[in-house]
Image (cartoon, rainbow, N blue to C red):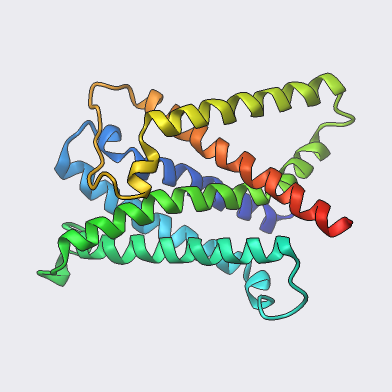
Amino acid sequence: MKPKQILKIAVDLLMTASLLLLMAYSLVYGGDPTVGEAVHEWLGVGMFALFVLHHILNRKWSGAVLRGRYTPYRVVQTVLVALILLSMCGSMISGILLSRTVFSFLGSRGGQMTARTVHMLSAYWGFVFLSLHLGLHWGGIMGMARKLVKKPSEFRKWTLRGMAAFVAAYGAYAFLKRDFGSYMLLRVHFVFFDFDEPLALFLLDYVAILGLFVCVGYYLTAILRKNIAK
């Protein structure tokens, strides 16, 4: 594997880990608002830096956006990238307005309630968009994994499919249990955490929700490419 490809994978893994920690920051730091908010801000800046680096590493794709034929798959992929960009910018701009540590030197800033609303919308919709984006490229990830395992058996294939189905099913359950949709639709304006809950259980649920949308993205890709082949 080429060094650039390794770097791309490392950046994507760090972005995924950062995303999960950003969603769980109040539990990660034991509910201490001072420490939690400060580390959350620095982690958010790091996430945005990784996002920029990701686009630099994939600049050939960005440079070709206005060229070539647009298939249904490419339309979905491009729209999803635009939505991710919008959510990332929304998170960063609203985060700057809400900042009490990293950007405190900017002084007093208005629009705090609006910024909180935008921040929550950007975070939860961004989580879904990034998960779907990962799903669109899951076939390529599995392709690289197959190169490391020679001639996988049918048993292994069906075992992996069963595991994916279980993760997706549990992800759907966790999506409802965590009231994820209410945050996305602004039925609830503040995120509530149970500080007695172990961090591992929170992360398990969010990894499952991520897995659910990865599966949706993966099978959406299969459907779109199948239609192209007809």
Residue 50 against residue 66 in the figure, above or below: above
Viewed as shown, does residue 102 lie left or right of 60? Answer: left
Task: Give the image location of residue 206, x and y in percent.
Answer: 44, 34
Q: Quadrant of the C terminus?
A: bottom right
Viewed as shown, does residue 167 lie left or right of 73? Answer: left
Residue 61 against residue 222 in the figure, above or below: below
What residue is at 51 percent from the left and 53 percent from the top?
Answer: 129
Q: Is residue 74 visible?
A: yes
Image quadrant of residue 87? Answer: bottom left
Task: Give the image location of residue 91, x and y in percent.
Answer: 35, 60
Q: Is residue 138 visible?
A: no
Viewed as shown, does residue 76 lie left or right of 45? Answer: right
Q: Please state which of residues 125 and 9 is positioned toward the viewer in this rendering.
A: 125
Q: Residue furthest left?
A: 108
Task: Give the image location of residue 3, x and y in percent.
Answer: 69, 55
What residue is at 37 percent from the left and 56 percent from the top?
Answer: 122
Image quadrant of residue 183? Answer: top left
Task: Give the image location of residue 48, x and y in percent.
Answer: 41, 60
Image quadrant of residue 7? Answer: bottom right
Residue 157 against residue 148 in the figure, above or below: above
